[in-house]
């Protein structure tokens, strides 16, 4: 199935944890096999890492914060023209498929 959201798009979180709702961020990674996206600054998790020894170097231990994946159905694309969260449609012009905003009919890929 054709993905409506791509890496580099600005998206808004529409459901999930209450502190993440209505936040906007850029998609930094896509996981299409699991239908998940990683959004910058959203769904922050902490992982406690123990100290390991690799050769003679010591790798520091501590708490590492990272963005966890969120399901693609919980995000909505933000139109660059009208700056609103919108559904995405497709239009074919001259044999080229492009994404369009359902609210203002602007071309998103331009």
Image (tube, helix red, strand yellow):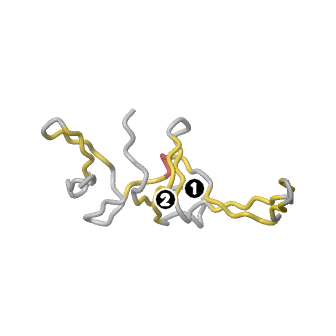
Query: What residue is drawn where x is 20% and y is 53%?
Result: 105
As drawn, is 86 to the left or to the right of 59?
Answer: left
Nearer to us in this view, 101 or 97: 97
Decide: few, some or many residues near mark 1? Use Cα within 10 Å; few <14, some 14-19, many ≥20: some
Nearer to us in this view, 77 or 46: 46
Q: Where on the picture, by quarter, is residue 48?
A: bottom right
Locate residue 53, reporting x and y percent: 87, 56
Numbered marks: total? 2
As drawn, is 24 to the left or to the right of 43?
Answer: left
Q: Where on the picture, by quarter, is residue 97?
A: top left
Locate residue 10, reporting x and y percent: 40, 60
The quarter of the image holding the C terminus is bottom left
Query: What residue is drawn where x is 81% and y is 61%?
Result: 59
Query: What residue is drawn where x is 56% and y is 38%?
Result: 34
Which residue is the site of mark 2?
Answer: 13
Decide: few, some or many residues near mark 2? Use Cα within 10 Å; few <14, some 14-19, many ≥20: many
Labelled pair 2, 1 in contact (Cβ < 8 Å): yes
Query: What residue is drawn where x is 37% and y is 36%?
Result: 2
Q: Helix, strand, or loop for circle 2? A: strand
Work out whether 4 lies above or below 103: above
The quarter of the image holding the N terminus is top left
Locate residue 11, reporting x and y percent: 43, 58
As drawn, is 4 to the left or to the right of 20?
Answer: left
Q: How far apart are marks 2 and 1 (CA)?
A: 8 Å
Work out whether 101 lies above or below 36: below
Q: Where on the picture, by quarter, is residue 84?
A: bottom left
Numbered mark located on residue 16 in the image: 1
Numbered mark located on residue 108 in the image: none
Work out whether 26 lies above or below 7: below
């Amino acid at each position: 199935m054709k993905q409506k959201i791509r890496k580099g798009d600005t998206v808004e979180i529409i459901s999930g944890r209450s502190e993440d709702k209505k936040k906007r961020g850029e998609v930094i990674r896509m996981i299409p096999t699991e239908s998940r996206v990683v959004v910058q600054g959203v769904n922050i998790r902490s992982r406690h890492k123990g100290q390991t020894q690799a050769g003679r170097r010591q790798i520091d231990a501590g708490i590492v914060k990272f963005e966890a994946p969120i399901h693609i159905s919980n995000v909505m694309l933000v139109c660059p023209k009208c700056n609103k969260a919108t559904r995405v449609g497709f239009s074919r012009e001259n044999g080229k498929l492009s994404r369009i905003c359902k609210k203002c009919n602007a071309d998103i890929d331009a």
